[in-house]
Image: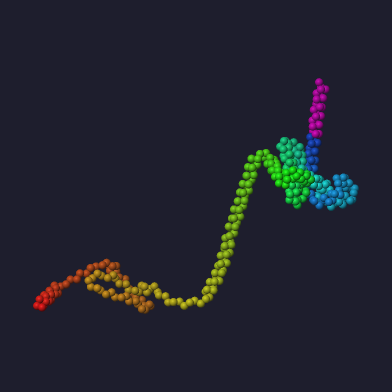
């Protein structure tokens, strides 16, 4: 029984030790994969079309021969890639011999897979992302290949050999009109499915993105309009100052001009010097109203006393005839009547 217990302990310890060794190897492989992916990515980023002429005289074997051959050293020194001969060969392989500049997606996927392996994370979602990324890269290079065939003047580095080949087949199969429509539609669907896996979610996402962009544009226009409004008063002040200077000059010119002879003005006191009479009283005999007389001398001062308010009240006058006058008038009437009777 003791031997069996020892055997089980040794077997479990061996399994645990073997598992640790496997885990260490996975960690080492993951770290190496991250480094290799980073080097490939940097090589593609530092690709230079001028290195293609030098790479026709170099090969992968020259990496080993480099320390022992002076000619290879001189050629490698003329390369423009930041990673030297290795970077130039890797960049030429991925850019020209595969799918062009979009091949930078491949080392990124390699780095991400190495990171998942190192951190022991779930890879189900990343498998879907990897498939969509590869499909998108192929369709992207094919799009540039079709554009180069239809329009021209597009460098081969944008499509690579794979993109140019697929573009040639699609144009011969669907023509110059059908091929771009099919490829662009497939590219759009790939992007939509890769982002949300649902076209309705993608449409709502694009709508919200457009709304946010529109709001930012309106805010920017509002701030720009406020700045213009704040600057306009300064301009108006400057214009007002210029107008004031011009008007000041004009005023000085007008002041220098000879003044016309002033006409003698009739003083307002003349209106007060007119003699005002009280209203006429009602009477049987007409009373002649004296005409107002103006004072000829303006310098003479008159102590005028205003009439009382009682003059404004009209009062009636009754003429009383004495009795003697009435008797005399009666006598005269009788004498006149007697004279008319004798005639």
Q: Residue furthest top?
A: 1
Quadrant of the frame with the N terminus:
top right
Place residue 60 in its image quadrant: top right
- For the point 86% across and 48% down, the residue is 58
Instruction: Depth check: give the residue in front, 171 or 63.
Output: 171
Report the residue at 80% width, 38% height from top: 29
Instruction: Tell me if residue 64 is in the magenta stretch.
Output: no
On screen, 249 above or below 111?
Answer: below
The picture places residue 124, in percent across and down from the top left corner, at 72, 35
Residue 85 visible? yes
* Image location (x, y in percent) of residue 133: 73, 41
Q: How many marks?
A: 0
Question: Residue 229: percent from the left, percent from the top?
Answer: 58, 57
Which residues fall within the magenta stretch?
1-22
Picture quarter containing residue 137?
top right
Give whichever of 156, 200 is nearer the camera.
156
- What residue is rendered at 60% in x and 57% in y? 228
**Magenta stretch: dominant SS?**
helix
Instruction: Name the side, left or right, on which 72 lies relative to 168.
Output: right
* The magenta stretch spans residue 12: yes
> On the image, which quarter does residue 318 sit in?
bottom left
Q: Quadrant of the C terminus?
A: bottom left
Estimate the x, y position of residue 34 in percent, counting from the top left: 78, 41
In this rendering, is residue 15 above or below 215? above
Going by the image, does 136 lie left or right of 251?
A: right
Q: In the displayed structure, does residue 240 sit left or right of residue 169?
A: left
Question: Relative to 310, is 53 above or below?
Answer: above
Residue 213 horizontal side relative to residue 117, left or right: left
Task: Report if residue 143 is visible in the image.
Answer: no
Residue in the image at 23% along x and 73% along y: 285
């Amino acid at each position: 029984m003791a031997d069996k217990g020892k055997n089980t302990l040794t077997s479990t310890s061996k399994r645990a030790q073997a598992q640790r060794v496997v885990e260490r190897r996975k960690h080492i492989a993951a770290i190496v994969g991250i480094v290799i992916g980073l080097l490939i990515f940097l090589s593609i980023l530092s690709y230079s079309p001028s290195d293609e002429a030098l790479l026709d005289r170099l090969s992968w074997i020259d990496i080993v021969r480099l320390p022992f051959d002076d000619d290879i050293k001189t050629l490698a020194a003329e390369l423009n890639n930041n990673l030297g001969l290795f970077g130039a060969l890797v960049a030429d392989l991925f850019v020209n011999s595969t799918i062009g500049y979009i091949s930078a997606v491949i080392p990124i996927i390699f780095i991400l897979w190495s990171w998942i392996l190192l951190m022991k994370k779930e890879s189900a979602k990343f498998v879907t992302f990897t498939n969509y990324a590869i499909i998108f890269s192929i369709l992207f290079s094919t799009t540039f290949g079709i554009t180069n065939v239809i329009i021209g003047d597009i460098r081969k580095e944008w499509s690579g050999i794979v993109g140019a080949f697929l573009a040639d087949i699609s144009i011969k199969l669907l023509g110059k009109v059908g091929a771009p429509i099919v490829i662009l539609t497939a590219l759009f669907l790939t992007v939509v499915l890769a982002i949300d896996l649902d076209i309705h979610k993608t449409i709502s996402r694009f709508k919200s993105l457009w709304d946010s962009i529109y709001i930012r544009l309106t805010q920017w226009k509002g701030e720009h309009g406020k700045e213009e409004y704040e600057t306009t008063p300064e301009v108006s002040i400057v214009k007002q100052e210029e107008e004031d200077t011009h008007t000041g000059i004009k005023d000085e010119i007008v002041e220098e001009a000879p003044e016309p002879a002033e006409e003698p003005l009739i003083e307002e006191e003349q209106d007060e010097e007119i003699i005002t009479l009280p209203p006429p009283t009602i009477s049987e005999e007409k009373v002649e109203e004296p005409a107002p007389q103006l004072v000829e001398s303006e310098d003479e001062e008159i102590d005028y006393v205003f009439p009382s308010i009682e003059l404004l009240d009209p009062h009636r006058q009754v003429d009383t005839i004495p009795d003697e006058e009435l008797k005399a008038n009666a006598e005269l009437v009788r004498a006149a009547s007697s004279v008319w009777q004798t005639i």
